[in-house]
Image (cartoon, helix red, strand yellow):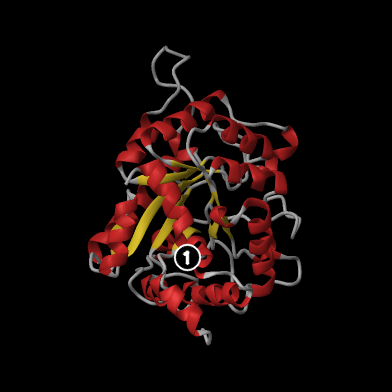
Amino acid sequence: MMSNPDAKAWHQKALVIDGHCDSLARVVRESVDLAERQSDGHLDLPRLREGGVTAQIFAVFTARMDRPVVFDPLDLALCMVDALYQQIAAHPDQLMLATSARDIEQAQAEGKVAAILGLEGGEPLGEDRQWSERWDQPRLDRLRMFYRLGVRNIGLTWSTRNALADGVFEAQTGGGLSKYGRAVVQEMNRLGIVVDIAHLAPAGVRDVLALTEMPIIASHANARTVYDNPRNLTDEQLEAVARNGGVVGVTFVPGFIDAECVTLDRLLDHIDHIVRVAGIDHVGLGSDFDGYGSNNQMPEVRDAADVPVITAGLVARGYAEADVLKFLGQNYLRVFRQVWGA
């Protein structure tokens, strides 16, 4: 997989963190056991171990989902959280929940995968009012309960509108954070939950960066200057994320890499650009594994087992060892330590 001896050695020693996958949906929808190697899809525990992945953010995605029964977003979110807990209980020698930076380091030391829970979209948090007559009281009870369940990353929207903000599909409205969305961001800062701006409309990105007191992430997005997709970040946004101390997770979604040239080299072009604009301290991995199909995917990175190929590509482009280690996981770990605590 990696002919370069430096790339192999650096990847083996690295703490590797992937900022986003949708594999919990498969666990719920298809009764997939993460401990069993699947013949399709992108991610399971055998392939994560082969790829040297130390920690994985598992998205709890409830904005839309193909299913025979329509669930309330809260019901579906709790179902998906429980599914991860069931996987951890079934495979404690391979998988553990991470709610602190120390947990991720422990997982690496013990040869396990650290599972990080993240909401993709704030729909499960409910609307912005309590059941009482206090119409000025934002509803933050569910947010606090999800924190207690172990959620440590929340993307405020998917690409559509919810009670917190407008997603990128609604960008033409110019809408940013709602009053409720502002209250949620402030409470996330207080609790220690990372704010994820992936999928958020530009006005919302500006609002978050002006409001937050903690570094944020864009868990799965690329550089819009390299390929013009509305889900990718502009140079102005990349610079703002850098000033905030945050991290952009480059994604493997074909439609965010290029219209035609979906290759490792093209993904590396996105990484190079983000490094030039934001700096090496502000870029990481954000695969979106199991969030896109197998058609037109990067031939060099078919699934989680192929993550070391990216390390080899970085080495081939002249990145130093310290920079490669930052990209693979140290940048995320810095943010997590600052937001979650040690």
**Is residue 263 visible to the viewer in this orientation of the structure?**
no
Q: Could you tell whether 293 is left or right of 102 in the image?
A: right
Badge 1 density bin: few <14, some 14–19, many ≥20, Cα 10 Å:
many
Q: Along the line of sight, which residue is nearer the eye, 50 or 341?
A: 341
Residue farthest to the bottom, as pictured: 3
x, y (%) of residue 212? 52, 33
x, y (%) of residue 173? 73, 33
Q: Along the line of sight, which residue is nearer the eye, 189 or 256?
A: 189
Q: Along the line of sight, which residue is nearer the eye, 332 or 26?
A: 332
Residue at left offset 44%, top offset 17%: 137
x, y (%) of residue 53? 41, 68
As displayed, is residue 185 above or below residue 341? Answer: above
Q: Could you tell whether 307 is left or right of 228 in the image?
A: left
Q: Could you tell whether 327 is left or right of 296 in the image?
A: left
Q: Which residue is mark 1?
A: 325
Residue at left offset 36%, top offset 40%: 146
x, y (%) of residue 22? 48, 59
User: Helix, strand, or loop for circle 1?
Assistant: helix
Res 299 → quadrant: bottom right
Q: Along the line of sight, which residue is nearer the eye, 14 or 203?
A: 14
